[in-house]
Amino acid sequence: MKKMVGSLFLTVMIILATILTGCSGKDVSASSKGKVVVDFWTFWGSETRRPVIDKIVNDFNNSQDKIIVKHTFIPWGDIWTKNLAAVAAGNPADVVINDINSVSQRAENNQVEDLSAYIKANTFKEQFYTNLWDTVLYKGKPYAVPFTTDTRLLFYNKDAFKDAGLDPNKPPTTWKELEKVAQKLDKKQGEKYTRIGYYPLFGGFGAPSWLKNADDGMGFVEDGKLKIDTPKKVKALKWLVDWQNRYGDKTIQTYEAEFSNGQTNPFIAGKVALYTDVGTFYTQIRDSGTKMNFGVTTMPAFDEKSKPWSDGGGFVAEVPKGAKHPKEAMQFIKYLTGEKAQKYWAEKNYDNVANKKAAETVMQGLTGDAKVVYQEAVKSLQYTTLSPVPIHYPDYQNRINPFIDRAMKGKMSPDEALEKAEKDVEKMKQ
């Protein structure tokens, strides 16, 4: 009886091991004989993005016979810490998708490989938008390759514009116009707002982004110098405080609760007439079933003499320090960031890809609302600035935010808030 139970247990374990191997390897182990296996980590596990990246990986694997890429999904909240832990342990993946703004920080900390030895032609960098390529450089050398980027756009409800007597084909282009348009779009029943024209901090454009927009796209740290307490940034913070006072804490908190529950977006529901988000927000509008009549444009400029500066981020493909197969990893990265793969990614996800030619090709092939949104996103990229993490002030944003919050809550004047914020950040270098 014991022998029978033991045999049964062994059989079950063999079957289970076979199933698990098939699930994790997805035929990689069976087809990797004689090939270099490149471990590739991403956080793309959703029903939308997982099939897209898996197809790109499979296409690369089928395009040559020397390398096989094994894709591993690691949740968003875990991938960064696991990557750093693997680097520290000397056993990292070969390719990891990471944040673009912190490339130089990882390079400074010796956590990522210098890729210059694998990029010999100057024409390679010309595939990508200049601001993205500059962000992956550390001391003049590339430590990653740009994959995707983003920019913020102003979405507006054309039916709400008509209802308020506004031209639905003329969205606001400056801060003053935005104020006037929002005021006309506001709707109230008694003391309660049934529709808010616009609130600058709803959506994907936070207070730091507005301060950059006002200051000619200049961030808080430029070329190692602090640019926090500047006249234009002070004006911008005062402007944001005025919006806060205009609607009041109760109204703003009520709307923020609706945004946070994730069930209905107040812009799509018609409760907010203008809204700021990245281009992929279009897919939420499209899939909402509302057949919303909307328009989209670049962010408004500070004044008539300014440009419509936007804030951007994005992701890169990089080789962690100590990776076993950096040469082969770079071969895959070149494919991943090349025109074919980038075009496919953009077509399926409406993401702004880093490869310029791919972005232009995708834009030409789209139709209807999708084309309009993508065109505006590509247009906005020329006015989009990134915020690379400065070496001497790595945690500067977390030091600035509390002071901005105090100003927004009326506990400190905008002038005082930014003056103290700059002094507090300066301490980091001491």
Image (cartoon, helix red, strand yellow):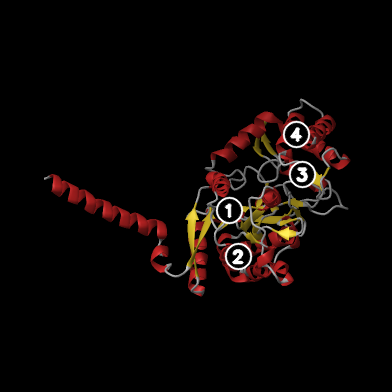
For the residue labelled by badge 3, is the local secondary structure a helix, a strand or a loop? helix
- Using the numbered discs, state the Cα–Cα distance from disc 2 to disc 3 in whole angstroms: 37 Å
Q: Nearer the viewer, mark 2 or mark 1?
A: 2
For the residue labelled by badge 4, is the local secondary structure a helix, a strand or a loop? helix
For the residue labelled by badge 1, is the local secondary structure a helix, a strand or a loop? helix
Residue 189, image x and y in percent?
65, 33
Quadrant for the N terminus in the image:
top left
What residue would you read off at disc 1?
Answer: 285
- Using the numbered discs, state the Cα–Cα distance from disc 4 to disc 2 in whole angstroms: 42 Å
Residue 124, image x and y in percent?
69, 69
Q: Earlier in the sequence, mark 4 or mark 3?
A: 3
Q: Earlier in the sequence, mark 3 or mark 1?
A: 3
- Using the numbered discs, state the Cα–Cα distance from disc 4 to disc 3 in whole angstroms: 12 Å
Three-letter amino acid code at the position of disc 1: Ile
Please tell me how crowded label 4 is: few (under 14), some (14-19), or many (20+) other residues with Cα within 10 Å: many
Q: Nearer the viewer, residue 138 or 296?
A: 138
- Name the outermost residue toward the left: 1
Q: Earlier in the sequence, mark 2 or mark 1?
A: 1
What residue would you read off at disc 2?
Answer: 330
Q: Nearer the viewer, mark 1 or mark 4?
A: 4
Three-letter amino acid code at the position of disc 4: Ile
What residue would you read off at disc 3?
Answer: 210
Three-letter amino acid code at the position of disc 2: Met
Which residue is rendered at x = 56% and y = 52% of the image?
284
Please tell me how crowded label 1 is: few (under 14), some (14-19), or many (20+) other residues with Cα within 10 Å: some
Q: Earlier in the sequence, mark 1 or mark 4?
A: 1
What residue would you read off at disc 4?
Answer: 404
Quadrant for the C terminus in the image:
top right
